[in-house]
Image (cartoon, rainbow, N blue to C red):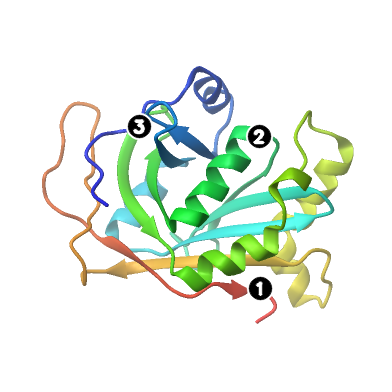
Amino acid sequence: MEIENMHIPSERISREMNGEEGALWYVPANGGEELALLVKMPTTSIKALIAGCSLRLFFGKKNSYLCVGVQISDIPSSPIFISKIQTEAEEHDALFRALKKKNIPLFLFSEMDKCLAWNNLELTKKDAYDILNYIGEKSELYTGFFTSEMSHALDCFGYHLILQILGLTLIQCLYVEYVPTSENGASYMAISIVTIIHTPLQSMKRTRVKHLSE
């Protein structure tokens, strides 16, 4: 799937993006005909992805709360981890549709809310099935306002890797990792504020879905 245009966030996403230093959203695009994963992160992290560092998509669940996250290994000893609990019905729907389609366009936004890079992320049939099976029924996922219980679930999600080192498992998580490759035709097209950089950059190749306990 070739991505030809940048994504223009909806009014709600623009408002949320403006109020966050880093965040992610699985959303419908082009009137609901397409889908997109939007991630706001530091420009330095975007440059690191373009240069070839790996990216991981995380999924965690505690009760009915679905936690989603992105890890960028720009500094291997101290990667950036962006996460949230998904509370909007349209985001649940977009994620499920993406998993069933087994691909989703990724758009990276800087601190200035400018789209600087994009690419298409793909899943194998097995990976998509594993994630869907792990998440469970869409109708059972929480939608609504942020609560103190959600805050605790998000803390569990965010610190899960550290806690596993200590032998504490609060919630199970899955992740799918994308690593640099030049094996296919897809490529990043980086955008500056004023012009498109036409030189093809690193594309991303999926590795298998893993349990964090592995």
Mark 2 neighbour class, 10 Å CA radius: few under 14, some 14 to 19, many 20 or more: some
Give the mark nearest the N terminus, 3 or 1: 3
- Would you name the residue on which mark 1 appears? 212
* Residue 166 location, quadrant: bottom right
**For the point 31% across and 38% down, which residue is it?**
116
Query: Residue 7 — which label?
Result: 3
Q: Would you say the residues marked 2 and 3 are in contact, meaning their CB atoms lie under 8 Å apart?
A: no
Give the image location of residue 18, x and y in percent.
Answer: 52, 23
Amino acid type, residue under disc 3 in the picture? His
Q: Nearer the viewer, residue 139 or 142?
A: 139
Give the residue at x 74% y 76%: 165
Q: In the displayed structure, does residue 107 sit left or right of residue 20?
A: left
Mark 2 and mark 1 lie on one chain; the one further toward the N terminus is 2
Q: Nearer the viewer, mark 3 or mark 1?
A: 3
Q: Which of label 2 and label 1 is nearer to you?
A: 2
Name the quadrant of the C terminus. bottom right
Asked whether the residues under the numbered discs 3 and 1 touch, taking CB atoms below 8 Å apart as contact, a structural biologist would say no
Mark 2 and mark 3: Cα distance apart in space: 20 Å
User: Which three-letter amino acid code belongs to the residue tagged 1?
Assistant: Leu
Question: How many numbered marks appear?
Answer: 3
* Precedes in sequence: disc 2 or disc 3: 3
